[in-house]
């Protein structure tokens, strides 16, 4: 605006323009959140323009965007600073500096907006929304913005640049994947909605909304804490690494964890926009949402609680009791268990639920040899999974494998038709003693790596195996320890 004024008045020195508009020759050019607005408005009024400071701040600066995400007090202070002559802390107050979101180096523009502007007003101007570093598309025309040759930081800090067509000619345009483009357009549109929103959202409890929405989609655990270890990868998958990097928000471990904690910190609007997109899909959807009370997580670190396993055990017991029931039947029989698992451990639930029953007519057409081979592959993977579980250690049993791959009843009923599967199972399924020996072996290996003394009682305790229950197991440990003792060449009494 000042640049256009300068051009229209025909002033040759920018200093003269500054003097006319700001009563000072030292005012710096600031494109997003300028100060000295009252003086500017007063001086413009003298030349025949009539608008108020409020109108100028709301229609021409980025203040109406940033005010939503800071406290009302901070917003008021920044607003007063913009009207007055103290520009120093406006950016910090409004959170534009928050969270490593870089600012732009060159002004950006939309070529269609420029065409329209020339047609309608006969001149060009830089649109405030396009100048956000996290806006890459024009929200009006949904095309990528071009980067001009006009640097934001001029050698002369008092210079106001008129966006001459020649300055804009070298428009560099970045390319984005189709998916990233879709999200970047959504982001730009939300920015536009936010800047045009007449209602001030700064009184809104964003955190309470986020938590309530997280609860709705199953990221709040039974103890009212956020399942952060599930949320972070899900969030990363949803937006993708490249997009998050483009939006200066790839460090979700830091900012996402912080934004759902009790905070007084100011977060850059892009962080809120990402949360809104992830949780609600759109700003209007988010604004209509009524958060429920009472979701106040104490902690955000993932922890497996005692009652976790209660629900897991219940679900397995239910299937054992009624092997003929489908997942849906079981859900109706025990909705509480199902809902808890669905919200807190969905992957496990999917792995440990009966598959849809195969109708008899289809079963006749089954290629058993092919089926046998594919089940063998699944069994091998399931056994690997079971073996890799240490907290708790799990015994390799036919029923555990069958449930994991959702084929328990097939394996049990048609063992004769699945010779390879049957052979594999008979070889690898563990007796209780075999299971205990594997646990002991694993514990001993760990203790050796950790450099712990191999006391017999410690091994039993860590492996949760009781001494004296099985001579076979007891002898196994004695042999193992004496072998190790021998190989270490140490004469110390370990047992
Ligand atoms: Zn445009």
Image (cartoon, rainbow, N blue to C red):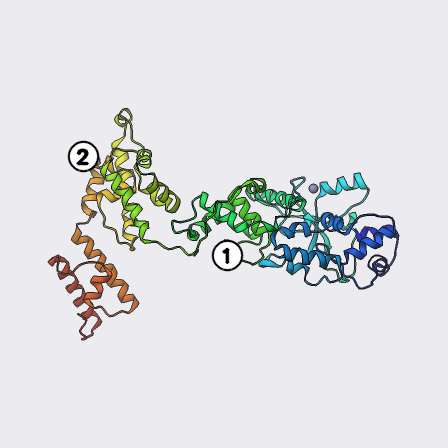
Residue at 21% over, 47% down: 428
Question: For this rendering, which residue is in front, 398 or 169?
Answer: 398
Say if residue 240 shows up in the picture. no
Residue 288, image x, y percentages:
56, 40
Locate ligand 1 by image quadrant: top right
Say what secondary structure mark 2 lies in: helix
Residue 81, image x, y percentages:
72, 59
Question: For this rendering, which residue is in front, 327 or 201?
Answer: 201
When asked about the image quadrant of residue 123, the answer is top right
Q: Residue furthest front?
A: 293
Badge 1 or badge 2: first in the primary sequence:
1
Q: Residues within 10 Å of mark 2 (few under 14, many from 20)?
A: few
Is 97 placed above or below 402 here?
Answer: below
Residue 189, image x, y percentages:
63, 42
- Report the mark closest to the observer, 1 or 2: 1
Question: For this rendering, which residue is in front, 30 or 219?
Answer: 219
Q: Residue under circle 2?
A: 416
Residue 29, image x, y percentages:
76, 58
Say what secondary structure mark 1 lies in: loop
372 lies left or right of 142: left
Residue at 33% over, 42% down: 337
24 lies left or right of 363: right
288 lies left or right of 137: left
Mark 1 vs 2: CB contact within 8 A? no
Residue at 80% over, 64% down: 26
Is 187 placed above or below 33 here?
Answer: above
When asked about the image quadrant of residue 118, the answer is top right
The C terminus, quarter of image: bottom left
Q: Residue furthest bottom?
A: 491
Q: Residue under circle 1?
A: 262
């Amino acid at each position: 605006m000042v640049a256009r004024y300068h051009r229209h008045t025909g002033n040759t020195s920018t200093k003269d323009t500054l003097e006319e508009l700001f009563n000072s020759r030292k005012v710096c050019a600031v494109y997003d959140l300028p100060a000295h607005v009252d003086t500017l408005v007063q001086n413009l009024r003298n030349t025949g323009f009539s608008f108020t400071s409020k109108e100028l701040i709301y229609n021409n600066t980025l203040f109406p965007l940033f005010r939503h995400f800071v406290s009302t007090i901070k917003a008021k202070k920044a607003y007063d600073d913009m009207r007055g002559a103290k520009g120093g802390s406006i950016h910090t107050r409004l959170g534009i500096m928050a969270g490593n979101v870089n600012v732009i180096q060159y002004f950006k523009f939309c070529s269609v907006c420029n065409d329209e502007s020339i047609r309608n007003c006969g001149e060009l101007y830089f649109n405030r929304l396009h100048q956000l570093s996290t806006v890459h598309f024009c929200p009006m025309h949904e095309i990528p913005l071009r980067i001009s040759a006009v640097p934001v930081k001029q050698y002369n800090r008092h210079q106001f640049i008129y966006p001459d067509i020649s300055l804009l000619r070298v428009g560099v345009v970045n390319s984005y994947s189709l998916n990233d483009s879709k999200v970047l357009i959504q982001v730009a549109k939300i920015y536009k909605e936010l800047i045009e929103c007449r209602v001030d959202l700064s009184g809104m409890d964003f955190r309470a909304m986020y938590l309530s929405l997280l609860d709705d989609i199953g990221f709040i655990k039974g103890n009212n804490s956020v399942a952060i270890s599930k949320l972070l990868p899900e969030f990363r998958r949803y937006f993708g690494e490249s997009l998050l990097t483009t939006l200066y928000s790839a460090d979700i471990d830091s900012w996402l964890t912080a934004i759902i904690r009790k905070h007084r910190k100011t977060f850059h609007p892009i962080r809120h926009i990402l949360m809104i997109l992830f949780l609600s899909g759109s700003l209007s959807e988010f604004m209509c949402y009524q958060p429920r009370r009472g979701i106040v997580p104490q902690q955000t670190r993932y922890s497996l609680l005692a009652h976790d396993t209660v629900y897991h055990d219940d679900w397995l017991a239910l299937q054992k009791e009624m092997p003929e029931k489908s997942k849906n039947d079981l859900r109706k029989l025990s909705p509480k268990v199902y809902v808890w698992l669905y919200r807190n451990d969905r992957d496990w639930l999917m792995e440990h639920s009966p598959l849809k029953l195969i109708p008899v007519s289809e079963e006749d057409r089954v290629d058993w040899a092919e089926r046998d081979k594919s089940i063998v592959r699944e069994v091998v993977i399931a056994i690997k999974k079971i073996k890799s579980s240490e907290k708790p250690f799990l015994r390799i049993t036919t029923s555990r494998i069958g449930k994991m791959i959702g084929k328990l009843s097939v394996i049990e009923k048609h063992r004769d038709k699945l010779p390879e599967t049957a052979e594999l199972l008979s070889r690898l399924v563990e007796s209780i003693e075999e299971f205990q020996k594997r646990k002991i072996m694993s514990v001993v290996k760990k203790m050796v790596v950790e450099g712990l003394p191999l006391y017999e009682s410690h091994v039993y305790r860590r492996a949760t195996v009781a001494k004296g229950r099985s001579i076979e197991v007891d002898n196994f440990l004695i042999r193992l320890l004496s072998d190790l003792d021998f190989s270490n060449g140490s004469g110390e009494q370990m047992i």
